[in-house]
Image (cartoon, rainbow, N blue to C red):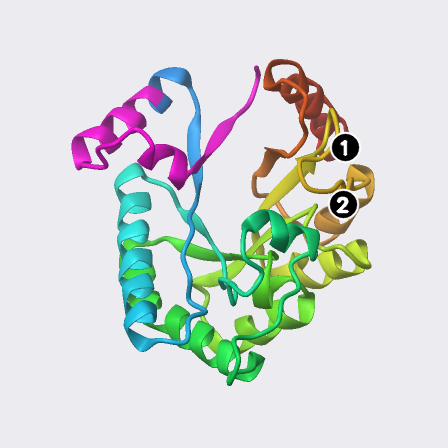
């Protein structure tokens, strides 16, 4: 379709079954033969948990995800803070626009402490592998620029930066994107052809491009489809729009 590279979603890799090194190297070889760079790996984990045992499990999982990226030659992984889990399903969380109440007996100050500590513990592995952690503006503590910058400043490491998603700031999106742009290592651009799966938060990509060009951003723009239209028609249309805005 004319892309320069691919960002892989880890859960789709896991759906294939084996995650051994032979499988990872076959993926890398396929990318080479296709003339595509593997530039990003989007992962899932849950630093935000009330139990130390669960947090330790998620930290160990994140370290293994960093090693997967290293095996594939991928220089950055998308990380998230996690959520309280009080909304029920992901669909219900989306209905609430990512806002949920803390678990009874805890508050967001506890959550920030856990998330910052979890990221700190992953930094040595990130530096060893040369894989930058890109905190995404997503649900949980990362749904606003204030939360994002609080975590970034507390961690204070070049191995933690941002993955900026054009569809995840629901209020004052351009101002918030501008706030995190200087520390962004990967930009994800959402389109919603056919209507959004959960909601539509279409961005003016010309505006977004100006924000990131102003910060001298030279990284990848990763297309993320959240519309209902068939990918075989929605993806080429989306790519054309992104090239017009970001070229």
Q: Is residue 102 above or below residue 109?
A: above
**Residue at point 28%, 54% (across, down):** 129
Q: Is residue 182 above or below residue 231?
A: below
Q: Is residue 127 visible to us here?
A: no
Label 2: element kind: helix
Residue sitting nearer the eye, 89 or 149: 89
Q: Is residue 33 visible to us here?
A: yes
**Residue at point 56%, 75% (across, down):** 102
**Residue at point 25%, 41% (across, down):** 71
How crowded is the residue under tag 2: few (<14 C-alpha within 10 Å), some, or many (20+)?
many
Q: Is residue 85 above or below residue 189?
A: below
Does 125 sit left or right of 171 as displayed?
left
Q: Position of residue 125 (x, y in %)?
A: 28, 62
Q: Name the residue beneath numbered marker 1.
A: 245
Q: Locate residue 87: give its quadrant.
A: bottom right
Does 97 sit left or right of 27 as displayed?
right
Instruction: Please report the bounds of the magenta region as a residue range.
Output: 1-30
Q: Name the residue beneath numbered marker 2.
A: 208
**Residue at point 68%, 65% (across, down):** 144
Label 1: element kind: helix
Per the image, is 16 magenta?
yes
Q: Are marks 2 and 1 in contact (CB under 8 Å)?
A: yes
Q: Locate residue 20: give its quadrant.
A: top left
Per the image, is 117 magenta?
no
C-alpha gap between disc 2 and disc 1: 8 Å
């Amino acid at each position: 379709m004319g892309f320069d590279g691919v960002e892989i979603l880890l859960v789709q890799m896991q759906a294939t079954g084996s995650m051994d090194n032979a499988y990872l190297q076959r993926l890398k070889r396929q990318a080479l033969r296709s003339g595509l760079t593997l530039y990003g790996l989007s992962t899932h984990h849950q630093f935000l948990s009330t139990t130390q045992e669960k947090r330790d499990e998620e930290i160990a999982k994140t370290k293994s995800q960093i090693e997967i990226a290293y095996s594939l030659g991928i220089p950055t992984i998308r990380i998230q803070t996690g959520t309280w889990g009080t909304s029920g399903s992901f669909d219900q969380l989306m209905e609430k626009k990512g806002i949920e109440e803390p678990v009874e007996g805890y508050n967001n100050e506890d959550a920030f402490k856990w998330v910052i500590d979890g990221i700190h513990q992953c930094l040595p592995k990130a530096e060893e592998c040369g894989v930058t952690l890109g905190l995404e503006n997503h649900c949980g503590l990362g749904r606003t620029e204030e939360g994002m910058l609080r975590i970034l400043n507390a961690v204070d490491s070049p191995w933690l930066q941002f993955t900026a998603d054009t569809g995840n700031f629901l209020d004052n999106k351009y101002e918030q994107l501008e706030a995190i742009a200087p520390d962004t290592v990967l930009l994800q651009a959402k389109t919603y052809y056919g209507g959004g799966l959960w909601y539509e938060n279409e961005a003016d990509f010309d505006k977004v491009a100006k924000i990131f060009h102003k910060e001298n951003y030279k990284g990848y723009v990763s297309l993320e489809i959240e519309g209902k239209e068939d990918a075989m028609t929605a993806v080429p249309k989306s790519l054309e729009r992104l090239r017009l805005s970001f070229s």
